[in-house]
Amino acid sequence: MMGRIRVIPRGFAGPGVRFGVPFGALIVALLLGAIILAIAGNDPFEAYSTMFDASLNGWSSITRTLALATPLILTGLAAAVAFQMRVYNIGGEGQLYLGAIAASYVGLALPATTPIVLMLGAMLLAGATAGALWALLAAVPKAYFNADEIITTLMLNFVALSLMNWLIFGSRSFWRDPRRPVPSGKRLPENAVLPSLSGRMHVGIIIAVVAAILLWWLLRKTSWGFQIRTIGDSPRAARYAGMGVRSKTMAVLALSGALAAMAGFSEVSGVTKGLEPVALTSNIGFTGIIIAVVARNNPLGVVPVSVFLAAITTSGSRLQGIGINVQVVLLLQGLIFLTVTAGEFFVMNRISLSPSNVTEAADGTPPSANEIAEATA
Amino acid sequence: MAGESTRLEVRNLTKLFYGVPAIDSVDFDLRGGEIHGLLGENGAGKSTLCSVLSGLYKPDSGTVSLNGHDVAFRSPLDASNHGIGMVYQHFRLVDSFTVAQNIVLGLPKDQRPRSMRQVQSMVRDLAEEFGLHVDPSASIWQLSVGEQQRVEILKQLFRGAKILILDEPTAVLAAQETDRLFEAVSTMVDKGHGVVLVSHKMAETMEYTDRITVLRRGKNAGSIETRDTTPTQVARMMFGDSNAAERTTFDTAHEIGEPVLSLSGVSVMGDHGLHAVDDASFVVRRGQVVGVAGVAGNGQRELQEAIAGLRPLVGGSITIADTDCTNAGPKATMRAGLAYVPEDRLGVGLAPGLPLEHNIALKSYDRAPYSRRGVLSEGEIEKTMNQLVEDFDVRGNRPGMRVSLMSGGNLQKAILARELNEDHEVLLAAAPTRGLDMAAAEAIRSHIVDERSDQRGVLVFSEDLDEIVHMSDVIIVMFKGHIVGSFERDELDLDLIGLLMTGSGVTRQDTVVSDEVPTDS
């Protein structure tokens, strides 16, 4: 019998593995990136130090990075809560647009003199509600007819995008500023704008971090979250334990939609200050999916991953400033992210080169992790 | 058939899984032109033997010879090239492909006819020859289960199989389809093919086979000419002669009280839209262990799920401790007092990817002391877990470790610990000791039987007849979704039970009913 390469699920990863592996992956990514930069005729050291300066070195760089991270945290949370239950909400993008549409409507419709806390609270609530309802368009068919939510949520993105574009470019809607010749959204009154904390960083970052902590608490510490985790691990065990899988599916998708829509509120109120389709369509919803995967659906993990991704993005524009080709920049960003993501595999599994001859179980099913672990212990 | 040379001969075959023999020094032979029945309980080694013959497993020792030459198959394809084909109970077909496509799927290029049209006409000829009628251009999803099975058989014949292994072929078939199958099988046999018929059903084995080999606990319990034997003898070979000493291990002196679980005329549909359980009525009383004997797949799983509220009843009613639980759902059934150890430990009884503490709280996570006002009390959960780990001797847990990494015995103890720790009136345990070592199995059994002394009722399902006999005060026999017999411990007739389990000997009208059934509906 030849020795075989065998992938063995760890089932249990200590903190050394959980933090060591992503860090190691980052180093590997930087080394690979250095090779690409060198081939493209750039100085890797100059490039990396520019990236660091642009994203994390100094207060203004940090605030810029955090401003960019704000909506990513929220869409990352949106994906994480759904994925935790193995419901695949790919519709964060569209839910974000709905959040932006509803929040900006409330911001424009309420009297400009409405107290700021009340105004922002109403906008947040309206946005989150719109996102939740939009997600329910996919959740109800999923819960009752088992319609694949990947397809429905994805398709609803295009509907939401068309709706938002129509409101500004295709009609004289309430949102559109009639005084400007170029189609654009009405400016939000001052009380409907999330106050700046420093530079571009606004109160949205606080909302996002608080949402992350609340969501973590909800999933880890409450009996509701207990059910979500059970359903995510084994729907049959959940049913056996008397949990309502259907109602949880709808609740989780609605919550996911609400969180993605909060990103829409945060962008429209804190950044674009009006419904601006072009500025809002920068794949924030889709990026949240990647963030959730890398953060292993842990709400607290979503925050650093979002900041990391924002840092890579902010530093990208600066790299072009020092004459590095935009394709090389994109390649570098992709490479870093891909490597860190791929590292996940090594957190959950280890590789063994043992010559052991583990055969399949008597009933023809592949051996379980348990059996392999025992056989190779 | 006289004059035919022995085609397949197996000597001293042993196959180990993790050091445990699934089959142990088994001898077996198949002659051309015969149907050879292979019988045995679940876990007796039938599937393992067939998987070795069909090239899926490599034996650890022993020889397989074909027409006098020793062979060692490297793969199912290799076995197929030697003329051995297996038809699995669960079909290996691609739903969206046509019959012809499925038949050539996996064949090396040089063995594949050039055009699909050619395949179709060859399949049509084969189907005609053996009476296995099916449209070669139809897609698999359009076919009935019986037709799909014909495709599987044609697939093997197309590859030139001279020896066909049929793994419980009639389990999925209706009566007429079964007749058609055996017509085709006898055509094959007339042409000199050898057929191994793996079965649980006594009647069809007695009717159609030429010889019978019985496997029991991995060993050959005997090979016998069918015409020289009786169902009783075969049943005895399958299930063994339980000795009386074993039956009285658990004391019988305890008080039998009120009914705590009553089923009246319960009917349940199976996954394929047929009645899996038909008009089942019985009661479990306080202080009583009722054991359900039966070969797997006779409606036990569906009945368990119906009692647990996981499968809707299409008729009849279920009462648990004076609460009507008919179609009440899993939660209400649980709260009415049902503790349930399901057949499927990982995936139903436990959430495999989550840690032990989560699984201990699985059923009462939403009540005190595990949670208060919707917030989990992790300290309380951990305290209970530590207590149960100690009381039930659950080993191998590490903080935060997913339970699926624990051994089967410990998993089962953990489930039982959780279930018995919940408030309950009746325990439903399905295959509680399957796959466990002797010590763990005995520990589980004594926990279950101890329930009697607390004036609770127990309903236990097991494929191991010895175990049922060992534990139960009343034994019920299930066959094809019907309750075909009921015995008090002191009127036990093991031969009759063995026959009833394999669906022969007694018709339904002859069943002994030892408990009156509640009449409310």
Image (cartoon, coloured by chain):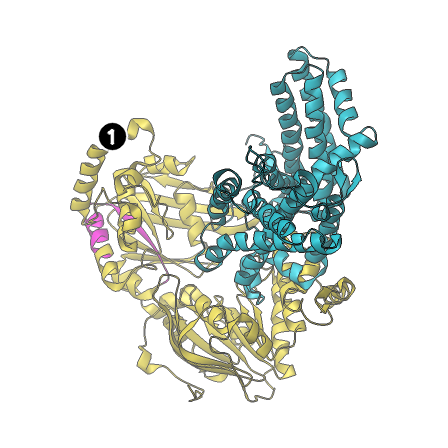
Q: Which residues are magenta?
A: B182-200
Q: Residue at x 78, y 21 (%)?
A: A49
x and y percent of residue B471 in the render?
Answer: 55, 75
Tell me, yes or no, whether the highlighted magenta stretch contains residue B387.
Answer: no
Report the amino acid beneath label 1: Pro
Direction top: furthest residue: A41
In the rendered image, the residue lying farthest to the front is A179
User: Residue B299 vs residue A231: left or right?
Assistant: left
The chain to which mark 1 is attached is: B
Please say if A350 is above or below B315. Answer: above
- Residue located 18% across and 42% down the image: B124
Placement of the C terminus of chain A among the 4 image quadrants:
top right
Please state if B25 lies on the left or on the right of B414 as rendered.
left
Front residue of A149/A124: it is A124
Is A95 in front, or is B484? A95
- Residue displayed at 62% across by 19% down: A326
Disc 1 is placed on an element classified as loop
Q: Residue at x 50, y 47 (%)?
A: A153
Q: Quadrant of the N terminus of chain A?
A: top right
Q: Name the residue beneath numbered marker 1.
A: B113
* Residue A312 visible in this rendered orientation of the protein: yes
What color was chain B assigned in the picture? yellow
Q: In the depicted view, which residue is nearer to us: B218 or A339? A: A339
In this picture, residue B228 sits left or right of residue A310: left
Figure check: B267 above or below B50: below
